Image (cartoon, grey):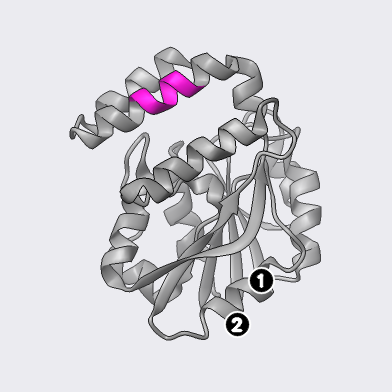
Amino acid sequence: MKCSVIIPTLNEASTIVPTLRRVERLRPHEIIVADGGSSDGTPELAAEFAKVRAGPRGRGQQLNMGAAAATGDVLLFLHSDVTVQGNALEAIEDALRDPDVVGGCFRVRFGNAPHQAFISASYDALRMGGRGVVYGDATIFCRREAFDAVGGYPDWPIMEDVNFVSKLRQHGRFRELRQAVAPSSRRWQRGGLWRTWASWWAVQLMFGVRVSPQWLGRFYRHIR
């Protein structure tokens, strides 16, 4: 398996070097940082460890840009503030031995967050409550041919990861691995537990009744 790790960034100077050092220890085929116009030196810091590609801001566009530069047969999309375990690539390779599996993700556990059990349970409720919702901080991976077949990520300001996983599920089996990844709790700490939780569920409900991602993006920027 040749795994290309793709990391979208926008002003992540405080997180990118530790993240890239951890990813290096996984020994992937390559690491690609897809930057959306950082002004804090993120691309320069990343260049020591990874191929850096620069383009317009927008996570979906950045992930597609990184995928376009990738040469691996498996794509792993990692947020710069998410910690993965040392056996992550072995777990992915094991899952993809099943030819029906086109991709998957990891479990999410906010180990360093206040009220982390409550936050993790909220993520589980969305995934297990019949909706199968998966966000990018669950560290999505897929076969290269599956990415191409579904057309990659949509150019949406929000929920592009949910849409991408939904398309993958239509193309084949999507596996959630037993291993966990640990996203940073910075968003919950900045916004406060209840405000962040309420805004997060509000976005889910509006998306569920087909409010446009463009409007949701403006709403989400406002409440953040």
As measured in the structure, the alpha-carbon distance from the residue carrying label 2 to the one carrying label 1 is 9 Å
188 in relation to 147, above or below:
above
To which quarter of the image does residue 90 belong?
A: bottom right
Q: The residue under label 2 is which amino acid type?
A: Met
- Can residue 10 be seen in the rendering of this structure? no
Count of labels in the image:
2
Q: Which residue is drawn at 38% across and 82% down?
A: 100
Mark found first going from the N terminus, 2 or 1: 2
Label 2, on which residue?
A: 1
Residue at figure coordinates x 30%, y 26% from the top left: 216
The mark found on residue 187 in the picture is: none
Residue identified by numbered label 1:
89
Quadrant holding the N terminus: bottom right
How packed mark 2 is, by other alpha carbons closer than 10 Å (few <14, some 14-19, many 20 or more), is some
Q: Is mark 2 on a helix, strand or loop?
A: loop
For image coordinates 35% across by 23% down, the residue present is: 202
- Badge 1, how many Cα within 10 Å: few under 14, some, many 20+? many
Q: Nearer the viewer, residue 32 or 163?
A: 163
Residue type at mark 1 is: Leu
In this view, 2 is above or below 119: below
Q: Magenta stretch: give its range.
A: 197-202
Considering the whole magenta stretch, tell me its main secondary structure.
Answer: helix
Cβ–Cβ under 8 Å for marks 2 and 1: yes
Determine which quarter of the picture holds residue 89.
Answer: bottom right
State left or right for residue 56 relative to residue 88: left
Q: Position of residue 37 (x, y in %)?
A: 55, 35
Nearer to me, 204 or 223: 204
Numbered disc 1: secondary structure: helix
Measuring from the top left, give residue 199's x and y in whole percent.
42, 20
Q: Quadrant of residue 145?
A: bottom left
